[in-house]
Amino acid sequence: MPSVEGWLRTSRYLKSRRPSPRVLLLSISNPPHNLLNGDVLYELSKVLKMLSAQETGVVILTSNIDDLFISHYDVSEIVDLASLVPEGSRIPPSVIRGALYVESWLHTFGLRPWIRRSTVAGLANLNCYHEVLQLLRSIPQVTIAAINGRAFGGGCELALACDFRFMVDTPAEGIPGEARGSGLGQPEITLGLIPGGGGTQMLARMLGPAKALEICLEKTLLTAEEARDLGLVNALYSRKELMPKTFEFAERMARRAPAAVAAIKDSVYEGASRPIMQGMRRENGNFGSCAMEPEALLAMKKYLEQQDDILGDDTLQKFQPLQDGTFSEFRPNSAYLERQWSRVTPRTPRQPVEELVQIRETARARIKERAKERAKAAKAK
Amino acid sequence: MPSVEGWLRTSRYLKSRRPSPRVLLLSISNPPHNLLNGDVLYELSKVLKMLSAQETGVVILTSNIDDLFISHYDVSEIVDLASLVPEGSRIPPSVIRGALYVESWLHTFGLRPWIRRSTVAGLANLNCYHEVLQLLRSIPQVTIAAINGRAFGGGCELALACDFRFMVDTPAEGIPGEARGSGLGQPEITLGLIPGGGGTQMLARMLGPAKALEICLEKTLLTAEEARDLGLVNALYSRKELMPKTFEFAERMARRAPAAVAAIKDSVYEGASRPIMQGMRRENGNFGSCAMEPEALLAMKKYLEQQDDILGDDTLQKFQPLQDGTFSEFRPNSAYLERQWSRVTPRTPRQPVEELVQIRETARARIKERAKERAKAAKAK
Amino acid sequence: MPSVEGWLRTSRYLKSRRPSPRVLLLSISNPPHNLLNGDVLYELSKVLKMLSAQETGVVILTSNIDDLFISHYDVSEIVDLASLVPEGSRIPPSVIRGALYVESWLHTFGLRPWIRRSTVAGLANLNCYHEVLQLLRSIPQVTIAAINGRAFGGGCELALACDFRFMVDTPAEGIPGEARGSGLGQPEITLGLIPGGGGTQMLARMLGPAKALEICLEKTLLTAEEARDLGLVNALYSRKELMPKTFEFAERMARRAPAAVAAIKDSVYEGASRPIMQGMRRENGNFGSCAMEPEALLAMKKYLEQQDDILGDDTLQKFQPLQDGTFSEFRPNSAYLERQWSRVTPRTPRQPVEELVQIRETARARIKERAKERAKAAKAK
């Protein structure tokens, strides 16, 4: 199994470290303007696919450059894409969708590296961008964007695809070195373009169509405060506090059960974008699947033993461990994580855990007992 | 026809009363912690299916226990569900969706009571839960949750499936008896679970994906004030005011036309969760269907007679009866309600109402007249 | 090619003028109450279809009557619709959807004028209404509602279908002439009806289901302030400022590239109402299509020449032209607009622009160079 840490050491655009064991910090480094481009995204997609839930519970995306998250997507790559067609011809969106579909089909045969060296590299880059966004929305890790400065265009979109966003607040005026710090937006319209990495989609789904149109058509740049007030950013911190607060939050999130994290992300992103009955059924399936995970069983058993105590306390103080996640930590080497969750690792048969067998047997006995009671009650009627 | 009142007298978990003729109050009673479980939901689904629009215009859900709405869904029933599979096996969501589908198919043959006594009772309970939620979203009654205290997990989800939510505000600190009062949230993640009764769906559709993830993954408990500020709760009241204010609101809502209530609920819940053109067409059909209801015709006729008066008044004071719904009350024994709306009652032929015939004839004469005018105008051109 | 200006001179219900060359102001005039009806909508749909992006970048909808936008849809036309069916019969929504579908099919053969003179005119009017709403959401012009007063029912829905809404603020109390000014809402429920022009859809998509139900079922009239606070209205202005501020905004919007405006509107309205992967793909196609437009290429080239300068400036002052849209104006006679965008004008072959050829050649040379570099790098590994 290739190690993500080993691969990251050879990475050109991604610096990495682990502020705590189950938290992986990825810093994008493409000086001077930290432009997003096909190469950066190719490395990102590689890392995200290699992550295992056993080792990593949280991924933090940030930049390696002071006061600058990501300026925007590299415009020269968009020109490449645009310059492929005969000048003056108008290509309908459906044709481009078709070409992108063909490229992603060829990718399944491992042809992307070859396509990225051809004149249609633009298609491969655009598909690769969307693969990264889709991975951020679907991996069992909690993803956090620590926006340490300007995030326009593609940078804003990359942040919007993460589960949480923390951002530096607008710096004091008149201090030149910090003026670069803030701002988030989609200025594509002023170049005759539109957001191409899900900007219209995430803004419209987060804020509704009216606000999304306002941002994409007119108010193209938002200050950090505006972004926070709209709910685009979860919290603002000063420059000094941004990373410590993000690490603190990440450590708390790293205690969540990976299966439940993936299930919630799928229910929210995929389920809630569908007609309501389809969304409900999707959540149902995810719920049942999580409830059958061994460590959820362990946690439920622990909870049932203490339930009367916890709920009986009017001040809810005994509920605290449930709120901050210390009640049942889903750590590496916990019952769950003994089995591999990641897609890249093979399934291995595993010895039954004594305790789990006991829970199941108790539960089954209970079901039988209740069934008898109900049958008796039904007869009595 | 079985009477809902009669059935409710034999109910074990539901206490009922009518604060006013067309308003039905259902109080869930499952001491000590008011846990939601399969039996409670089975009774709820039974009652909701028996309601007739003729008798009931508003359903209020509350609890029969002081300062406690519903603690959460009974965890021991989730353990039952979980303990059905061989330990260590991972069941994909699609298999669970399939099993739930089979159960609801068997239910159409009336086999649910039998299933609920078997070892796969968990599937029947989960389907029954979703039947209740879907009924709350589709019945022609306005549904209101009067949240008189703590509502976590399944309790929160039951409230979110209602059309309106009123809640007790956070009690003064230091008063032990009231400290139990407030709070709403989805703490499932800390047990390795996810919301299973539409929590992810309603939160994401009400607040967008970013806020829904924040609540489901991290900020698992919200105070009443936070819930109100987010728009999850329509209004907060003190303990003393909660029920009187809810009854006052309910009485106003009981004057709405049941057909229009059902049409608005369907357009909002079902229509607006679909692609925009499909949603528009759904609303269109609902609109036309409502406009053809006899009592809508009566109301429109009354309005046309007074239109110049109402719209001519610059202060909009004459508009008041339209705003508070006293302009045209849709009461039992009104033209509309003579016909049965409820699914459980048979259609009976009915004598034409003199007045309606008159409206229709006037309208038809008017159409012919306008057609002639238009033809004349067309010729003149 | 029929000129929109010429047609507007013969219009009965629409007064028009051009406050600036690329901005078209349409004032609806149907005294005394400015009711919306089939004839008004028929004229609106005609004008919106005739617009060419070459001449018009922004459409402003307002009313020709002081302190009154649109009272509501003409109730007598709804009675016409309703009186077509045998009294006492209940028509399910699906049948009405079917009838509307048949009407819009007949319309493709040009039969609508004939249908509008028949007894089923109501169906034609409802379809025509939805055609106008769909045009407002899809034309490459930015659409703005300047709500100069009361906008209830259909008037509120017409405004909600525009991209931006500016509204007069609530006038000072006690001044009789101005009391008529404000208010926006959907009071249909009090007549036993529901919003029929997308009110439930736009409200639910903009505010979520809970707030949409509150507005449609209970709080049927909102003041201008409430509408602004909810985000239903983009900004409030005094009576004197409303039109000057709207014109100023419109002039700025008229500099946007029509192809990008249409692409953003489609991505937001259509894309974001679909499952997330479908929405992303829709945005992708729109993005690629815009990026291939000649004037986007010109703007990107200009940007690439100045990129280091713009991004290197920490104060973001050089970014200003990108934010206010003066960086690259997409005017009539710009490279793009030499080609016709509008559906009604024929495609004409066009001489290649020297500059564009140069951009493309430079870009292609650059691609080849990069491909060589990459191949070399790959060999080196």
Image: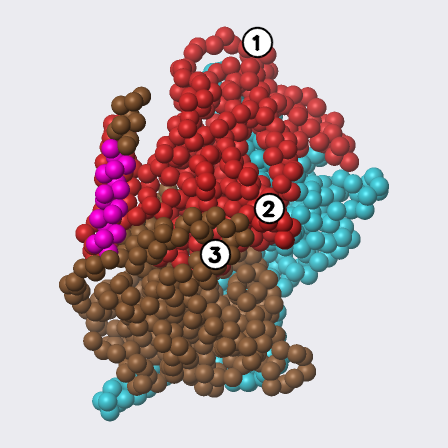
Chain colours: A cyan, B brown, C red
Tell me the crowding category of disc 1: few under 14, some 14 to 19, or many 20 or more residues within 10 angstroms, Cα based. few
The quarter of the picture where the N terminus of chain C appears is top left
The quadrant the C terminus of chain C occupies is top right
* Residue bearing mark 1: C354
Asked if disc 3 and disc 2 are in contact, CB closer than 8 Å, the reply is no
Q: Position of residue B343 (x, y in %)?
A: 24, 66
Q: CA distance from mark 2 to mark 1?
A: 58 Å
How dense is the environment of label 3, judged by Cα within 10 Å: few (below 14), some, or many (20 and up)?
some
Q: Is residue A207 above or below residue B146?
A: above
Q: Is residue A229 left or right of residue B368?
A: right
Mark 3 or 1: in front is 3
* Nearer to us in this view, B30 or A153: B30
Q: Nearer the viewer, residue A168 or B2?
A: B2
Q: Which mark is residue C37?
A: none
Residue name at image x 60 percent, y 46 percent: C178
Chain letter for mark 3 = B
Same-chain check, marks 3 and 1 = no
When asked about the image quadrant of residue A109, the answer is: top left
